[in-house]
Each structure stands twice: as structure tokens, then as C-alpha cells.
């Protein structure tokens, strides 16, 4: 029945709609430091078997292949692309990029993902207590917590994550903390919670925490910020393709509707 | 009764089926590794011939017309879909013939194996190489899941060898069966054939391309034309049925009045 065609096309429309939403979110975040683009993955739905292969006819011949009609498509997931964005030279002492694998670990409220979240956005600031926090409206604390003394000048973060400051009347820089980064077996399984933060999920596996530069973890680069990894050209091409596919599926709906209408008007007495 | 009405009815049913299949093809235009279905309609012999009921009385004049149209089996168009570079290191596309083998469900026999051309892979929490969409492990040539080191860079060579730090870490199986026409779709981008055929699968000669996916092999123009053609043929068939109906009504009412 053309009803199946209607359903297939509507499954196509709703899946393509999800895809449009993902693309527009990617494009909206083209200038968000540390943002990771997502993509929509599609799969075909189940098939209805209208005739089974192997059924014999009156002469005893077997039907060589069956008759199947598909029921449309669906979105199986949005996959986050964890490739690095290009580092941008900002000159700020508290801008840090991870060159390679890993995430900064920050403290969040306990209800979400056991109290820790992970981010690639290394734009930090110092709050009124001298702690290093994320430079946004929430001011999430970096974990482990690092306190910068009030009278410190010239903050340096080296490749392995050690934080040094210069104190008055001291020649040698003083180490005040160590930034740790976390890696995951399956980063694509992490859950995005906004603010460029991700939390651990059953699919991502537990975080493996350690110092930058050890065990395939990335190293830190101070005064650089990782830019968004959204490629606007690709996103725009995807947008065009999605929009055209959307139009074609809505044509199918129109055609199926037209068919049902002619049938019902012609055959009604 | 009007024989033509049955013929028009068979045409209507066949057109609706064509539309359903074309709609599914278009709905899956963004599905990675999707192969479109092709519809076939064929001449249907008159009922007496088709069912081998030669002893029944025949209507010689009308039987020459046959029995209208019937729906033929659905066949998959297994042509290569266009490759699209994504740059993701765990996207693997197949160029040429062959399928990845994934394991679906418990057990170990060939009845649990599925074929797929959807090579969007990722590592799961046990660091096995799995399909992103279904989470099912892709198998190596010994039908075992491939476990990798999650921290090291993964290189997949055209022949399916998986290397990490220059060492061989696994071998992706790329398989085919002797009779690809026996494959049918199982949904979730997977294909399945009978366990006997799956057990006798052989190595395929396709090449793997890392950092790319195979787009659906659906031709959007063709699929749209299929929908439009089916729509036109359904509406003309339904108009024919209405004409026969009118004719019969006339026969019943006007002739009855004359008599």
C-alpha cells in the first residue's frame, strides 16, 4: 500500500530533520573554542517479507528470491568527531591547548556524571580564591585544584602540565601545581552536557588520569587555544545535501498522498 | 464480470508496491553502505495457466490478454556507492566487492554472522573494534573480535591489516559469498544469507579505504522518477477501475429498465 510509502518517507523526513539540527548546531559553534563537531548516523529499518524465497509453485519450481519491502530509515546516533581543532595563538597565560589525546578534568555538581566533567577547552581564569577555573560564567574548578598565590607574577605551564609562578624575592620559579589530563577508551561514547563539557558514560569506559605526555597522552601548550573543529565548507555541503534529500522525501509524501486520493475518489461510490 | 477490472486491479497493486520500494530507497539516501532495491514487475499468465488448472473451462478470447501484471522478486542493486572522505580514522569504506563480517547475537555459528558495508567503526569500552551504529563487533579472518590498544594510532591498510605502532594488531575480514543474489537485507545496514552460504564465505578482493565512508548507492533522480511513475500508473489504473464500475452500473440499471 502507498501507506508504507508514506511511512518510509516520513521516517526519512524526521531523520533528515535530526541531521539538519545537528548541522545547524555545528555551524552555530564554528567559533567556539574546543568545540567538537557531531554527525548523524543513519540506518535502514526492518524489512517486511511479502513473499518468502524457496516457496514452490505448481510445477515444483522454487521461487529463487523473496519479495521484501523496506520500512524507511532511522537515526542511530550522533557521533562526535574528536579530531583536534587547530591551535590559535592567543598570548594569554591561562590559555592551554592539549596537543594530542586527552581532556582537562573539571569539578561539576555531583548529580551529573559523578561530579567530574571533561573538556578540551583550555581557556582558564583565576577566581577570587586564587583557584584556576574555566573562564566562563560557571567558573568550574580545574581538578586537581591549583591555587595561585596572591602575590605571584608570571605564570608558566610546561608541556608536562607543571604550573610554575614567580614569587617576589625569589629567583627560581616555584611549582604550585600539576595539571592532569584524562583519556577514554571510547571518547565517542561520552555524553555532551553543554558548556563544551562531556561526562563519562557506560559506553565511554572509565577515565584514565595521568600527567600530560605520559602513556600516549597529549602534551600541553601554553598561550594557545584549540579552535572549533567544525569545517564550515563540509557542513554547508552537508546542509545542501540534507535539504535536497528532505525535499525529495516530501515529494514522495505528496505522490503517495495523491495516489491514495485518486484511489479513494475513483473507487468511492 | 469485467475481466479488465481484474487487470486494472493487478496494475494498481503493482504500482503501489513500486512506490513503497522507491520511497524506502529515497528515505535511505543518507544511509551509509545502503544498497537500493530494484522492483520488477512481470507479465502474469491467465489464472488457469498459472495454476496449472488446464481442465477448467477457458475463455479463449480473454485469456490471450494474460492475467495482468504481477510483482516480481525484489533485487538489490549491489553497485558501488560513491566514497566520501570524512577524515575520521575509524571510518573504513570498501572499494570493490566484499563485506565486513559482524557478529549479531550469542552463539558462534555462521547463523550469527551478518555482512555490512557500513564501516563507521569505533572502539567500545572493552576496546574492541565495533560498529558505531549497532555496537556489534567486526570480526577478523578467524571470526574473532579485534581488540586494539585505545591509546595508539590505528592504521588500516587496503588489504584489511590493522597496524598500531608499526605492529600488526589485527586483520579485518573482507568476505563474499558465492551467490550474492541470495543476500537479503536484515535492517540496521546489515545483510544476511542462509547459514550454509555464510559458512562457505570466501575472501573478497575489494580494497579498504581508511577515512572514508561509502554513501548510499541510491540515484536520487531515478528514485524520484520511480515514485512519480508509480503515482501516474496507480492513478490511471484506479481511473480504469472506476470506468468499469460505471459501465457495470449502466449495464445493471439501463439494460434492466429496457427489459
Image (cartoon, rainbow, N blue to C red):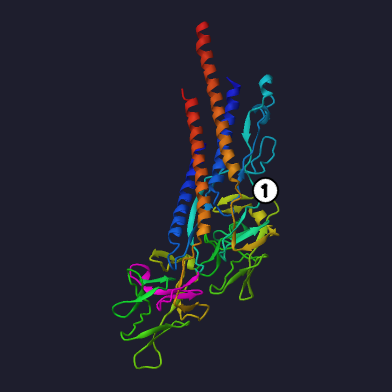
Vertical position of residue B250 compared to residue B103: above or below:
above
Give neighbour class at mark 1: few <14, some 14-19, many 20+ (Cα, 10 Å): some
Q: How many numbered marks, from 0 up?
A: 1
Residue farthest to the left?
A128
Label 1 chain ID: B
Residue B178: horizontal and vertical position, in percent? Answer: 71, 53
Residue B13: horizontal and vertical position, in percent? Answer: 56, 33
Question: Viewer-proximal residue, A24 or A201?
Answer: A24
Vertical position of residue A91 compared to residue A164: above or below:
above
Residue farthest to the top?
B259
Which residue is pictured at 34% across the width and 71% down the height?
Answer: A108
Q: Is residue A71 magenta?
A: no
Residue A4: horizontal and vertical position, in percent? Answer: 51, 40
Say which element carries label 1.
helix
Residue B202: horizontal and vertical position, in percent? Answer: 70, 59
Q: Is residue A105 magenta?
A: yes
Quarter-wise, where is residue A175 in the image?
bottom left
The answer to whether B75 appears left or right of A149 in the picture is right
Which residue is pictured at 58% across the width and 27% down the height?
Answer: B8
Question: Viewer-proximal residue, A12 or A35?
Answer: A35
Asked if residue A50 shows in the view, the reply is no
Residue with the mark numbered 1: B181
Vertical position of residue A94 compared to residue A197: above or below:
below
Which residue is pictured at 44% across the width and 82% down the height?
Answer: A161
Asked if residue B80 shows in the view, the reply is yes
The magenta region covers: A86-114
Quarter-wise, where is residue B106 in the image?
bottom right
Amino acid at each position: 500500500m502507498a501507506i508504507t510509502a508514506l511511512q518510509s518517507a516520513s521516517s526519512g523526513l524526521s531523520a533528515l530533520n535530526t541531521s539538519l539540527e545537528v548541522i545547524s548546531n555545528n555551524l552555530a559553534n564554528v567559533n567556539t573554542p574546543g568545540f567538537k563537531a557531531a554527525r548523524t548516523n543513519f540506518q535502514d529499518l526492518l524489512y517486511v517479507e511479502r513473499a518468502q524465497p524457496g516457496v514452490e509453485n505448481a510445477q515444483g519450481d522454487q521461487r529463487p528470491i523473496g519479495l521484501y519491502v523496506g520500512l524507511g530509515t532511522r537515526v542511530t546516533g550522533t557521533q562526535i568527531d574528536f579530531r583536534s581543532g587547530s591551535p590559535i595563538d592567543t598570548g594569554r597565560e591561562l590559555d592551554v591547548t592539549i596537543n594530542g589525546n586527552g581532556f582537562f578534568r573539571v569539578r561539576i555538581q555531583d548529580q551529573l556524571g559523578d561530579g567530574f566533567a571533561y573538556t578540551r577547552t583550555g581557556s582558564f581564569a583565576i577566581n577570587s580564591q586564587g583557584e584556576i577555573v574555566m573562564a566562563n560564567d560557571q567558573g568550574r574548578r580545574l581538578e586537581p585544584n591549583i591555587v595561585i598565590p596572591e602575590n605571584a607574577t608570571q605564570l608558566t605551564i610546561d608541556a608536562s602540565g607543571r604550573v610554575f609562578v614567580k614569587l617576589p624575592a625569589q629567583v627560581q620559579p616555584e611549582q604550585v601545581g600539576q595539571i592532569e589530563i584524562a583519556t577514554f577508551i571510547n571518547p565517542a561514547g561520552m555524553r555532551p552536557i553543554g558548556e563544551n563539557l562531556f561526562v563519562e558514560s557506560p559506553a565511554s569506559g572509565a577515565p584514565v588520569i595521568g600527567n600530560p605526555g605520559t602513556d600516549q597522552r597529549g602534551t600541553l601548550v601554553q598561550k594557545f587555544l584549540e579552535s572549533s573543529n567544525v569545517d564550515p565548507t563540509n557542513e554547508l555541503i552537508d546542509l545542501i545535501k540534507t535539504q535536497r534529500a528532505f525535499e525529495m522525501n516530501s515529494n514522495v509524501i505528496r505522490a503517495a498522498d495523491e495516489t491514495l486520493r485518486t484511489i479513494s475518489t475513483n473507487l468511492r461510490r | 464480470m469485467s475481466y479488465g477490472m481484474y487487470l486494472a486491479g493487478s496494475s494498481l497493486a503493482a504500482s503501489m508496491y513500486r512506490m513503497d520500494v522507491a520511497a524506502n530507497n529515497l528515505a535511505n539516501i543518507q544511509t551509509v553502505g545502503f544498497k537500493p532495491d530494484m522492483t520488477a514487475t512481470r507479465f502474469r499468465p491467465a489464472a488457469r495457466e498459472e495454476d496449472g488448472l488446464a481442465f477448467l473451462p477457458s475463455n479463449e478470447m480473454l485469456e490471450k490478454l494474460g492475467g495482468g501484471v504481477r510483482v516480481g522478486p525484489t533485487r538489490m542493486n549491489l553497485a558501488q556507492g560513491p566514497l566520501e572522505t570524512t577524515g575520521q580514522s575509524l571510518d573504513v569504506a570498501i572499494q570493490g566487492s566484499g563485506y565486513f563480517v559482524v557478529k549479531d547475537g550469542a552463539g558462534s555459528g555462521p547463523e550469527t554472522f551478518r555482512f555490512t558495508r557500513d564501516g563507521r567503526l569505533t572502539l567500545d569500552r572493552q576496546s574492541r573494534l565495533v560498529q558505531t551504529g549497532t555496537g556489534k563487533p567486526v570480526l577478523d579472518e578467524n571470526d574473532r573480535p579485534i581488540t586494539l590498544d585505545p591509546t595508539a594510532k590505528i592504521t588500516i591498510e587496503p588489504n584489511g591489516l590493522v597496524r598500531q605502532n608499526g605492529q600488526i594488531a589485527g586483520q579485518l575480514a573482507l568476505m563474499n559469498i558465492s551467490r550474492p543474489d541470495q543476500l537479503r537485507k536484515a535492517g540496521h545496514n546489515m545483510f544476511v544469507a542462509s547459514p550454509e552460504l555464510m559458512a562457505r564465505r570466501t575472501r573478497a578482493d575489494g580494497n579498504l579505504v581508511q577515512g572514508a565512508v561509502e554513501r548510499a548507492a541510491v540515484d536520487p533522480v531515478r528514485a524520484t522518477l520511480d515514485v512519480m511513475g508509480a503515482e501516474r500508473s496507480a492513478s490511471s489504473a484506479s481511473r480504469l477501475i472506476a470506468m468499469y464500475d460505471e459501465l457495470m452500473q449502466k449495464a445493471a440499471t439501463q439494460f434492466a429498465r429496457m427489459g
